[in-house]
Image: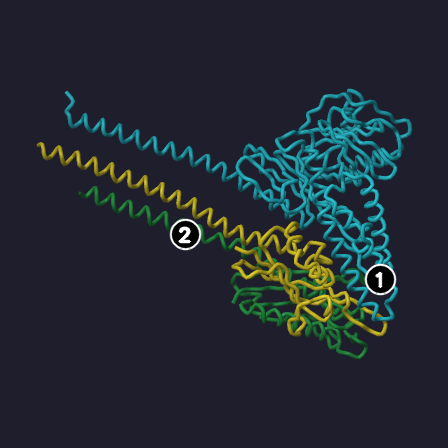
Amino acid sequence: MYKKSQAQIMEYIVMIFFVMVIIVVIIIFLSGWHFAQLKAEETKDASSRVLFLTKHLSHSPLLVKDDYMFDDGKLTALKSLGPELCGELEKIFGYDWYIEITVLDGKPKTECTWSNYPDCNYWEFCTKNEKNVTYDLPVNVYRRIGYTLSTGVFSRVDIGFIRVGVYA
Amino acid sequence: MISIYKLFRIIFGIIASVFILYFLIYYSAVYSEMQRDTQRVLILKAFKKTAQDVYLTGIPINFSQFSKLEFDLYFEGTAEPPKLRSSVSSMIVMTPLFFAQGDNIFIERLDLDYGWWKFDFVEAVPDMTIIFNPLENTEEIWDMMKNITKTLPDTTNFRPKVTFGFCDGINLDENLCGGKPCERYDFLNILNQQHGGVGFSKCTAGMDKEKYRLVTVSSSCRHGFADKGICIVPSQTDIGNFYINGSAETYIYKDPLDLVSAIIGGDSVSIYGIGAEELFKYKNKILGNRMKIMSKVMAQRSVLISGRLQANTNWTECVIPYKNLADTLYFGGQDSISNILSNENYYKNLPLLMQLKNKLNEARAQYQELVDKGCEYIYV
Amino acid sequence: MRKAQINIILVVLLIIIFGGLALFLLSFARTISQDEYMHMYAHNLLLSILRTDTGYTDIQCKLVSDVTRCGFFQTEYRCGKSGPNCLTIANESINEYISRFRDIRKNFRYLFTVEPVGFVARSSTGEPLKISIGDSTLKTAKISKWAASEEIRKITATGEYRLRAQLIIALK
């Protein structure tokens, strides 16, 4: 009789123990879920930021003639601002990003400078040697000194792509 | 008689239940508060994304998610970088934004066009009625009211509504358009009508400062003249003084957005100051920064292109206009737009602002000359 | 003893179910962002190709959109006075630009088409005119794909005519 009572009491204690375990598991799961949500949001944030930056840079009159049509004169002029350039751009577009613009003209990649303009096809801004999240996008590049003919100098629109990255 | 075993079961059961219930209620209360805060952050992020989309696409939209929870928002425009602050978080806002809090917000993109550059910005405003109180009947005052109206959002076919009216003494004339409040297009038609003999007395009507924005226009404006909103001294040169209720400073306007930023900011006071003052300073800081770098880039571009064109004898007609533009924008030394804007407090200095206005007009004409000669494109 | 065993099994089952649910829901986070990017890519590629210069300076042949319009409505016109006809140049240019992007994004499949909307354009030999460049199986393939389209308009004495340029991309 005594042993039977003891066994029954033990049963209850074991039952309560397992209910506690389930509650603790649910709490751990909820906290883990919350943490996982934050992590997912962080990844989504980085991707969203790159996408927005791509659209913002491709719309800004500082770099473009029209949406997604970069102006080669503005890009080369920006490069001439020297080491202060990145700081100035960060005041407008935010921190920790870079952009590369490449014209797909079938010629070797030549970075544009004041002296070789317009015989060049590549610009880069704020590049660093760090881990980043990037997106590529097709764009146009407006070449102000496009065709040089006997009748005059005419503009031309070339096809190219941009690579925009955000440093992690 | 109850056995000891049964008693044990009852007591043990009560202790265990209380423990479990306490834990569940405590955790769910904490978690639901966390959920509300998380929701507030998500709504703020959604608003930021919506404002960015409007800035990029130019398609106006209304945003009503602020009505779901209580928010205490403040746009800290003079912070570096500018932030939208709430009790739970702050969000960096890189796109030019003129924001007033409300449950239902209308977001639209507008611009200031300088010819060689266009400054795009976004206005995000709740239900709002702009009440004009022009105390003299002059062309400058009516032109000023038209310019201010054109720089505010057009909410036709949208909710919330930005409407316009007049105040005459203790009377508020809000329903001027067929017995209904006027939106931008209809109010501009009213302003374009003949106004000979029209007169208003100083506004003394009571109005809710969340919904109404009073704009007094009078050559008698001074500190404390108007007890609500802003008070503008009209000017023939488009540059003049205005006063913000509650502030001891005298402000200078040079374009309609200076006045509109103060109107949107409103009379609300926070730890950061008066809303009108904060938005006015933000407008001048962001415009100054962007115009400074833009003028440098356009000037360098002009020199770069004119140098290449000089080699080609058929296009020398572009060379001189490019050089003139470059000088006005940056290379003209102290007189250039970039140099004027290098003074952080340029917007508080009347002689500098007069100089800036002249140079902007010059740059506009020089760029138009380049467009007319086929040397440049019109910036759309 | 049996009750304790059942409880242990229940706990393990709960962990498996919740864990699985979490992983399943997390997998959606990446897909939404990729969708927006792919739509942007398709739209931008189409727009960029149409706005690019062909190398010819006559008004009918300057941009890819110009030479495409010319190819459907001025079938006899020759670019640069004695060069190839417009439709040939349109095909060559579009093919060239798509190939350049194929070299950069090797894991994409492309299909670029231009068709008249609501009418039939015919060549001098009576054949219906159409541009179709790339993987033609993409049009009917039952896979995830992203499309963009733009209209090229021509106003004539008899009214307005439209061409639909469409680009479909998919992952390999």
Residue placed under numbered mark 2 in the picture: C23
Please identify the quarter of the rendering in which residue A115 is found.
Answer: bottom right
Instruction: Sort mark 2 into few (<14), some (14-19) or many (20+) by Cα contacts within 10 Å.
Output: few
Q: Position of residue A49 (x, y in %)?
A: 57, 52
Chain letter matching colour yellow: A
Q: Residue at x 20, y 29 (%)?
A: B9
Placement of C11 over or under B175, stated as above or below: below
Q: Of helix, strand and loop, which one carries label 2?
A: helix
Q: Chain C appears in which tint?
A: green
Chain letter matching colour cyan: B
Q: Position of residue B23 (x, y in %)?
A: 34, 33
Instruction: Sort mark 1 into few (<14), some (14-19) or many (20+) by Cα contacts within 10 Å.
Output: few
Please identify the quarter of the rendering in which residue A58 is found.
Answer: bottom right
Q: Position of residue C22 (x, y in %)?
A: 41, 49
Residue type for callout 2: Leu
Q: Residue furthest bottom?
A: C82
